[in-house]
Structures are given as C-alpha cells and as structure tokens.
Image: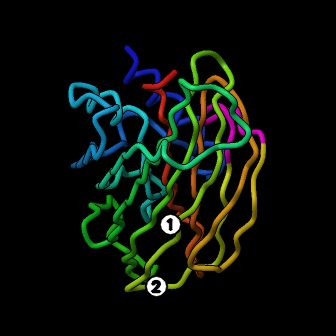
C-alpha cells in the first residue's frame, strides 16, 4: 500500500510539471535501484524502505514518464556538529541519489522521432539531521549533472515535506552543479532536482530523495 501511495504522489508531481496526460498503464517499471548503506545506524533490512523514498523519471518523446535506474548511497556523518540542534540523540545523515537517463534505452510508441538522443546522469544529495520528534532539519542539498549527449536548458531544486507539498525552491539554471542550504524543518523531508533539455519539452528529468524511513 505504501509503494502504491508513493507512486500516486509521484505521478501527481509529474502531472504538474508536464502538460501531457499520464496513465498508470503507460509507465515502464523502474529497472534497478542499487542501495549502498555505509553506516551501522541504518539496518540493511530497511533497504526496501529506502527504495520507496527514491524516484527518478524521464518524460519520453511520446510524453510518457519512464522510471530510471538509480544508485543510492546513505551514510551517517553525526561527527559533524549541527549547531541548530541541541540534543544528544540527533543523528546527521547523507543520502545521495544518482539517476541515469538514456533515450536510446526507452521504447516509444511513435515511429517518427524528431528530438535528439540524450544521455546524462543527474545527482541530488540531501544532508539532514534526524531527531526524536517532528523537528528534523534539512541542512544541505547538493548535486548536479553530467551530459554526454544533448544540452541542458534549465535546472531547478525544490524541497518541502513531500512530492506535492513543496515549500521552497531555487533556480539553478544551466549550472552543472549546485549547493543549497534550505534551512527547512519538519517531520518529513523531501527534495527533488529537475532538468530540462534544450530544444524539447518532452525530456524533463526529475530525481527525488525522501528519507521517510527516519520519520
């Protein structure tokens, strides 16, 4: 039920950033999410729950969202002092999501494709401090993209409590890297990185991170 609900929320997000109608029947399954846990503070049996908070999607040439392969790394960096949190049980984590987009790997229902092939990787990393209670802090967002085919027109970073409850954003333009300090506090934390390819509105890429397992 949690996975179905998360998928529905993700679809609502893509409806808001792309004018094409989206049907559940048109969505390709996400092929692979590799999770690398680098801390004893996150039990390995929570890997499936970690996957539930990760989404990476590209809109194909026919306007359909296709889930992308991802590499996820999570680590505990609690030795770095967070001066905004004055409690001994606070833990600071970093969760990195790297997604890989390649238009050649996407099947299309259309025989005439005028848009150029694209190939890139996009990364978003969230550093946050988790406490007992509702006042978890989103301390830093960073990441960027690497392009081997195509050209990026624009990028944006957004954050809030969920896919559909965005509290703030920062326009990061054509820059291939970013660092943002959201100064955001809440019981749930979410962020996503959006890339738009130059010359087409159909290759929107969004990479999401939402460490809900620590709620």
Q: Is residue 57 above or below residue 201?
A: above
Indicate the quadrant where residue 194 lies. Answer: bottom right
Element at badge 2? loop
In the image, the segment drawn in magenta is: 159-167
**Residue under circle 2?**
150
Q: Of the residues under marks 2 and 1, which one precedes in the sequence?
A: 2
Q: Is residue 30 above or below residue 129?
A: below
**Residue under circle 1?**
203
> x, y (%) of residue 188?
60, 27
Left or right position of 156 against 214: right
> x, y (%) of residue 80?
54, 49
Left or right position of 53 against 188: left
Label 2 Cα crowd, 10 Å radius (few <14 / some 14-19 / many 20+)? some
- 158 or 19: which is nearer to us? 158
Q: Is residue 173 above or below residue 69?
A: below
Left or right position of 155 against 124: right
Disc sitting over residue 39 in the figure? none
> x, y (%) of residue 32?
22, 49
Q: Which residue is depicted at the point 65% across and 31% down? A: 161
- 12 or 61: which is nearer to us? 12
Say whether marks 2 and 1 touch (CB < 8 Å).
Answer: yes
Q: Which residue is depicted at the point 26% across and 28% down? A: 43
Residue 161 in magenta stretch: yes
- 6 or 111: which is nearer to us? 6
Element at badge 1? loop
**CA gap, disc 2 to disc 1?**
10 Å
- Examine the residues drawn in magenta and state their main secondary structure: strand
Q: Which residue is depicted at the point 73% across and 49% down? A: 182
Residue 112 in magenta stretch: no
Q: Which residue is depicted at the point 66% across and 19% down? A: 134
């Amino acid at each position: 039920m949690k996975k179905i609900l998360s998928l529905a929320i993700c679809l609502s997000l893509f409806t808001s950033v792309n004018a094409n109608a989206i049907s559940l029947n048109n969505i390709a399954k996400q092929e692979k999410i590799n999770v690398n846990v680098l801390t004893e503070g996150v039990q390995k049996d929570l890997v499936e729950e970690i996957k539930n908070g990760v989404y990476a999607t590209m809109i194909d040439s026919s306007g359909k969202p296709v889930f992308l392969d991802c590499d996820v790394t999570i680590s505990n960096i609690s030795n770095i002092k967070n001066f905004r949190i004055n409690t001994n049980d606070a833990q600071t984590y970093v969760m990195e999501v790297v997604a890989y987009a390649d238009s050649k790997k996407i099947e299309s229902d259309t025989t005439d494709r005028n848009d150029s092939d694209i190939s890139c990787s996009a990364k978003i990393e969230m550093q946050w401090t988790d406490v007992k209670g509702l006042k978890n802090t989103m301390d830093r967002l960073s990441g960027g993209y690497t392009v081997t085919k195509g050209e990026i027109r624009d990028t944006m970073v957004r954050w809030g409590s969920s896919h559909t409850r965005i509290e703030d954003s920062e326009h990061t333009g054509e820059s291939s890297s970013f660092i943002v300090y959201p100064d955001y506090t809440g019981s749930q934390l979410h962020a996503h990185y959006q890339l738009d390819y130059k010359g087409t509105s159909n290759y929107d890429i969004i990479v999401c991170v939402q460490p809900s397992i620590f709620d």
